[in-house]
């Protein structure tokens, strides 16, 4: 969608393909919480973040060169990619990995689900075609409540126990929101080139930080499960996930792309049922229903369909 040709108050819509990609993205990012929980006790946060983006950048650089041609040469574009790298990778990865040393996966998922709340506010202020409206307000509130119900009220009892870790996760969610909106400035680049460029700049930023403030040698001492988790974070939760993410932002807007954080807990529960034989409770069903209602309200098409049917019935 071209920002210049969009009405000032129009909200980007999502196609069936966009919704399918959003669901896939939620699975890829949902898995990142589990991979990180396995890896971070053995690999320090800065080093784990470097391994995640470094491996992903190397893979995507090859793919991008084969599929999208030469990399951009403009210093201005690379500067924008560096800012995106800081907001989408460096800051949130380090904060989330550090936070997960002290808080549970469930609480981390709840705090991560605030990203769309920050996203609608940032997009409303900084864009012209991704504006806040009543449907979005209702949908975001319903979606966030659904995440809390889905993950379970017991996790809320943890709030305040590790305040700095919780603030770190909230800071990561806020950083994602700014990063998603900033991505709009490189719309002329293909999603694969944006993903590759961002991860390359993330590696360039994290490498000296890791050498100065962390222990890169810890990778050599890590167990096989921890190394496998880091590789999964790189290939699945970064390389593949960011290809999908930037495609969604280009086609459906920053706020819609951030809706994946609402779906992450649903994906985690479904994975548990299918792969681990876990059961589904009424509370989890209620949480899923609230999330789906919230997403439907944000999308708007279901609401407009109901209004049209109501008007036909009463005409």
Image (spheres, grey):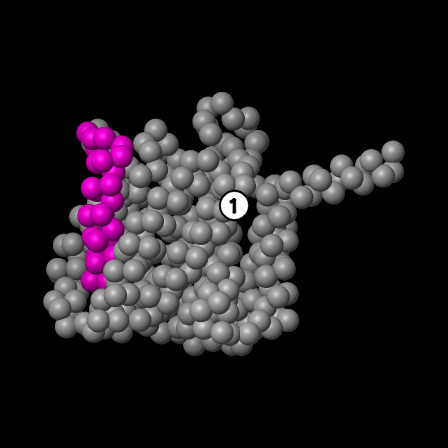
The magenta segment is: 46-73
Against 210, residue 272 (above or below) is: below
Percent of width and height locating residue 60: 25, 44
Percent of width and height locating residue 198: 27, 43
Q: Nearer the viewer, residue 309 or 119?
A: 309
Q: Is residue 211 left or right of residue 188?
A: left
Task: Please tell me which residue is depicted at 87% across the width and 33% down the height of the picture.
Answer: 315
Q: Nearer the viewer, residue 296 or 278?
A: 278
Q: Nearer the viewer, residue 281 or 44?
A: 281
Percent of width and height locating residue 259: 50, 50
Quickly name the residue at label 1.
Answer: 19
Against 33, residue 9 (above or below) is: above
Q: Is residue 280 left or right of residue 3?
A: right
- Residue 300 seen in the current view: yes
Task: Please tell me which residue is depicted at 57% across the width and 41% down the height of the picture.
Answer: 132
Let me know if residue 187 is in the magenta part.
no
Residue 275: image quadrant is bottom left
Against 263, residue 246 (above or below) is: above
Prevalent SS, magenta region:
helix
Percent of width and height locating residue 19: 52, 45
Tell me the SS state at disc 1: helix
């Amino acid at each position: 969608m071209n920002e210049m040709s969009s009405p000032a108050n129009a909200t980007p819509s999502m196609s069936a393909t966009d919704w399918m990609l959003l669901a896939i993205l939620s699975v890829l990012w949902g898995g990142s919480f589990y991979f990180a929980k396995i890896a971070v006790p053995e690999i320090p946060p800065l080093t784990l973040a470097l391994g995640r983006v470094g491996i992903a950048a190397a893979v995507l650089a090859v793919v991008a060169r084969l599929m999208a041609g030469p990399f951009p040469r403009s210093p201005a574009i690379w500067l924008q990619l560096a800012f995106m790298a800081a907001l989408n990778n460096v800051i949130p990865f380090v904060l989330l990995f550090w936070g997960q040393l002290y808080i549970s996966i469930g609480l981390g998922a709840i705090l991560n689900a605030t990203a769309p709340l920050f996203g609608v506010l940032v997009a409303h202020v900084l864009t012209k075609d991704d504006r806040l409206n009543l449907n979005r307000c209702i949908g975001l509130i319903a979606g966030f409540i659904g995440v809390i119900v889905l993950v379970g009220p017991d996790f809320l009892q943890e709030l305040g126990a590790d305040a700095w870790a919780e603030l770190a996760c909230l800071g990561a969610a806020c950083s994602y929101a700014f990063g998603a909106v900033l991505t709009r400035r490189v719309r002329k680049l293909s999603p694969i080139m944006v993903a590759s460029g961002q991860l390359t700049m993330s590696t360039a930023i994290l490498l000296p930080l890791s050498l100065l403030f962390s222990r890169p040698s810890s990778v050599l001492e890590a167990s096989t499960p921890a190394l496998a988790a880091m590789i999964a974070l790189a290939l699945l939760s970064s390389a593949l996930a960011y290809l999908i993410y930037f495609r969604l932002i280009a086609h459906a807007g920053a706020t819609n792309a951030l809706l994946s954080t609402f779906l992450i807990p649903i994906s985690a529960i479904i994975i548990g049922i299918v792969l681990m034989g876990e059961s589904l409770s009424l509370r989890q069903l209620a949480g899923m229903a609230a999330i789906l209602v919230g997403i439907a309200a944000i999308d708007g098409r279901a609401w407009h369909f109901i209004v049209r049917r109501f008007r036909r019935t009463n005409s």
